[in-house]
């Protein structure tokens, strides 16, 4: 009798606690995610991600999303190493350059099995940049889905162009860009030191992340990779290296120290007014607008030049995708949050709050996206439509741009010819396949 009474009291107490305490007081499934964004910070994309996490956790009180921010250039290599030790996160973000390595590794789960097989044809077709949507497709399996597409852009100062009498529409070739950059390079106080450089592009071998003028130059000249075999030391490859070298040593439109500058360095210096034209991620547009003391209205985006005026410069399709770890202990919950990050509300947040081009056509067609402030997005979409391309995801293209930047350094400080430097870059690429 005494034991029965104790059991009855215990069950009653547990029932009372279950109704009195919130679900969060009990054990939750924790889904870890590696991304280069930090939801505790205040950039547009970080604010958008924080809102997604909050809304997801509210809708799914038994799941908590734990973000572990990483350096963007180290995300995939670190994930693949963690996969080998069994310590990888449930969700990882991957960029275009690392997609091939992710697929080949076998470290990503098939998202068709997790949630995509239940989608309608209309849901699938809503992702209108098909090259980006299918970037992770291999052997009938889909290993990642796009969170937002991006590209490398040429940002320019409208006020500097106007002062120099340069029509942005007149820059159709790389020679014309160099000519414009020469006019834009200025020593305002005549002290022998350049105050504004005409052109800037990251030439470091670290933290480049697919953001370099090299990519557009080489793609414009022909086939860069043939079945994962690089064709860097071609005439156009040599010409591309030499143009970078000449912009530093001959035309003096870029400072020599640019060979040590990564993407963040170039962005910071452009914001500070050090460059009139600069290569940087399109995703930084809203950040530059916010931070530039020379005025948000003075920021513009140039179409990519080509080698001849009769062609349109190629516009790269880049971006960030998300994958679920194949060995995750919580694949269902990880898949739930991954799907949440690409639902229409999330895509709208990536666009309006984060300043990204929408991945869904249904969102892109919404009246709100027709506002003049989103004209800069239209310019990118038009560029993709005219001459868009993606680097081959079947290859391990991680650090390909670092190899090209290394080639410039080998010429400037190593005494190599441009051809010799690009031959070394070819060997470096092949060593990673």
Image (cartoon, rainbow, N blue to C red):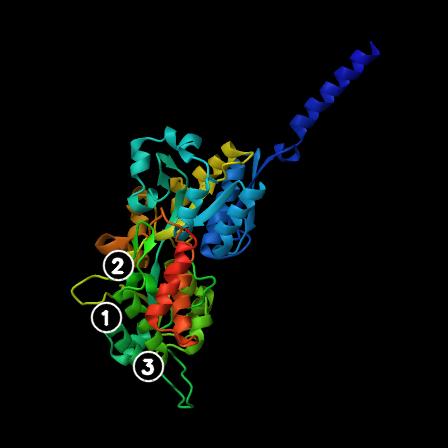
Closer mark to the observer between disc 3 and disc 2: 3
Q: Are marks 3 and 2 in contact (CB under 8 Å)?
A: no
Q: Secondary structure at mark 2?
A: loop
Instruction: Rate crowding at label 2 as few (under 14), some (14 to 19) or many (20 or more) other CA atoms within 10 Å.
Output: many
> Is residue 145 shown above or below 151?
above
Q: Position of residue 111 (x, y in %)?
A: 42, 35
Taking depth in this image into account, of 73 and 367 the one nearest to the observer is 73
**Image point (27%, 73%), residue name:** 177
Residue annotated with mark 2? 314
Instruction: Rate crowding at label 3 as few (under 14), some (14 to 19) or many (20 or more) other CA atoms within 10 Å.
Output: few
Q: Is residue 280 visible?
A: no
Q: Are marks 3 and 1 in contact (CB under 8 Å)?
A: no
Residue annotated with mark 1? 171
Q: Secondary structure at mark 1?
A: loop
Q: On the picture, is 76 further left or further right than 12?
A: left
Q: Is residue 76 visible?
A: yes
Residue annotated with mark 3? 250
Extreme residue toward the top, this view: 1
**Image point (37%, 42%), residue name:** 136
Q: Secondary structure at mark 3?
A: loop
Taking depth in this image into account, of 237 and 59 the one nearest to the observer is 237
Q: Are marks 2 and 1 in contact (CB under 8 Å)?
A: no
Q: Position of residue 196 (x, y in %)?
A: 38, 79
> Is residue 7 shown above or below 82?
above
Taking depth in this image into account, of 353 and 81 the one nearest to the observer is 81
Q: Give the Cα distance between marks 3 and 1.
A: 20 Å
Q: Give the Cα distance between marks 3 and 2.
A: 26 Å
Q: Which comes sooner in the sequence, label 3 or label 1? A: 1
> Is residue 76 shown above or below 62?
below
Q: Which comes sooner in the sequence, label 3 or label 2? A: 3
Q: On the picture, is 102 further left or further right than 253?
A: right
């Amino acid at each position: 009798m005494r034991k029965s009474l104790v059991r009855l009291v215990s069950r009653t107490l547990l029932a009372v606690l279950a109704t009195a305490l919130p679900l969060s007081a009990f054990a939750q499934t924790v889904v870890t995610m590696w991304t280069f964004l930090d939801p505790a910070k205040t950039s547009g994309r970080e604010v958008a991600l924080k809102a997604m996490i909050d809304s997801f956790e509210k809708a799914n009180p038994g799941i908590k999303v734990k973000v572990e921010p990483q350096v963007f250039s180290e995300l995939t290599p670190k994930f693949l190493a963690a996969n080998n030790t069994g310590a990888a996160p449930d969700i990882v973000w991957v960029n275009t350059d690392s997609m091939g390595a992710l697929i080949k590794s076998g470290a990503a789960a098939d998202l068709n099995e997790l949630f995509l097989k239940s989608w309608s044809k209309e849901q699938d077709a809503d992702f209108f940049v098909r090259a980006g949507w299918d970037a992770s497709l291999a052997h009938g399996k889909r290993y990642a889905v796009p969170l937002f597409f991006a590209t490398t852009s040429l940002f320019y100062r409208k006020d500097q162009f106007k002062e120099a009498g340069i029509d942005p529409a007149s820059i159709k070739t790389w020679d014309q860009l160099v000519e414009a950059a020469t006019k834009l390079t200025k020593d305002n106080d005549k002290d022998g030191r350049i105050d504004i450089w005409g052109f800037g592009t990251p030439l470091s071998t670290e933290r480049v992340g697919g953001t370099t003028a090299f990519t557009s130059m080489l793609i414009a000249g022909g086939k860069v990779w043939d079945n994962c075999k690089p064709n860097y030391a071609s005439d156009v490859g040599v010409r591309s290296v030499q143009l970078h070298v000449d912009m530093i040593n001959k035309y003096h439109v870029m400072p020599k120290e640019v060979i040590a500058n990564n993407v963040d360095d170039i962005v910071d210096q452009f914001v500070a007014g050090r460059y009139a034209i600069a290569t940087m991620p399109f995703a930084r547009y809203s950040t530059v607008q916010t931070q530039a003391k020379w005025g948000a209205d003075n920021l513009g985006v140039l179409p990519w030049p080509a080698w001849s005026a009769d062609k349109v410069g190629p516009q790269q399709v880049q971006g960030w995708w998300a994958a679920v770890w194949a060995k995750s202990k919580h694949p269902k919950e990880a898949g739930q949050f991954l799907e949440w990050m690409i639902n229409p509300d999330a895509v709208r947040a990536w666009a309006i709050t984060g300043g990204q081009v929408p991945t869904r056509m249904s969102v892109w067609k919404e009246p709100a996206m027709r506002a003049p402030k989103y004209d800069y997005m239209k310019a990118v979409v038009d560029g993709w439509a005219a001459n868009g391309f993606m680097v081959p995801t079947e290859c391990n293209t991680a650090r390909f741009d670092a190899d090209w930047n290394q080639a410039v350094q080998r010429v400037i400080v190593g005494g190599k010819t441009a051809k010799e430097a690009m031959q070394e870059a070819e060997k470096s690429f092949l060593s990673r396949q």
